[in-house]
Amino acid sequence: METTLLLVKPDGVQRGLVGTIISKIEQRGLNIVGMKMLSVSNELAEAHYAIHEDKPFYNGLISYITSSPVVAIAWQGNKAVSVLRQVLGSTNPTEANPGTIRGDYAIDIGRNLTHGSDSAENGKIEVNLWFTPEELIEWTRNDSKWIFE
């Protein structure tokens, strides 16, 4: 089982899409093992986007992610990273397939509603950055045998 991070970014929260986003992912079969709404501090934003520190859009990322509340969700399941990324769609919404979150609800890359971990390794790192161990709950869905072999 993999654990991965989803952030519903400020545009997703402001547009009232949190429930829609959660519903699409739950319907695929992943479990929420941690969830919280928060105002992102500069320190957390800088740690999360450290990989982009030398890029010209870095300051815009920091300013945007700290501009309004986000919802952070830790998801767990078989192939959780690839399942989540498939549901989200391409980072650039104009390249995202219809039926994906970004394909159905976003237009601009800078307002693409969500962040999803890009690998199992980064999923662990990001979940540990956004959640304490006490905020995560391990559990099994009753319908898991109908979702995973």
Image (tube, rainbow, N blue to C red):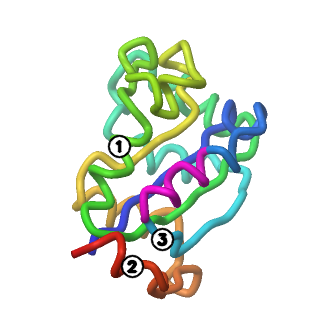
Residue wearing tag 3: 31
Which residue is painted at 55% across and 24% down in the image?
A: 104
Depicted 33 relative to depicted 109: above or below? below
Closer-to-camera residue (101/120): 101
Q: Nearer the viewer, mark 1 or mark 2?
A: 2
Residue 72 rendering spot, x and y as whole percentages: 59, 57
Alpha carbon distance from label 1 to label 3: 15 Å
Local crowd at mark 1 within 10 Å, few (<14), some, or many (≥20)?
many
Give the residue at x 45% y 79%. Answer: 143
Q: Is residue 130 left or right of residue 64?
A: left
In the figure, is residue 11 to the left or right of 122?
right
Mark closest to the chain's N terminus, 1 or 2: 1
Tell which of 4 and 125 is nearer to you: 4
Q: Main secondary structure of the magenta part?
A: helix
Crowding near pointer 3: few (<14 within 10 Å), some, many (20+)?
A: many
Question: Going from the N terminus, do you reach mark 3 or mark 2 first?
Answer: 3
- Is residue 124 inside the magenta stretch? no
* Circle 2: residue type: Ser
Residue situated in front as seen by the camera: 48 or 138: 138
Tag 3: amino acid = Asn
The quadrant of the rendering that contains the C terminus is bottom left
Under mark 1, the amino acid is Arg
Q: Residue 23 colored magenta? A: yes
Q: Callout 2: few (<14), some (14-19), or many (20+) C-alpha neighbours within 10 Å?
A: few
Read off the residue under disc 1: 85
The residue under label 2 is 144
Magenta residue span: 21-29
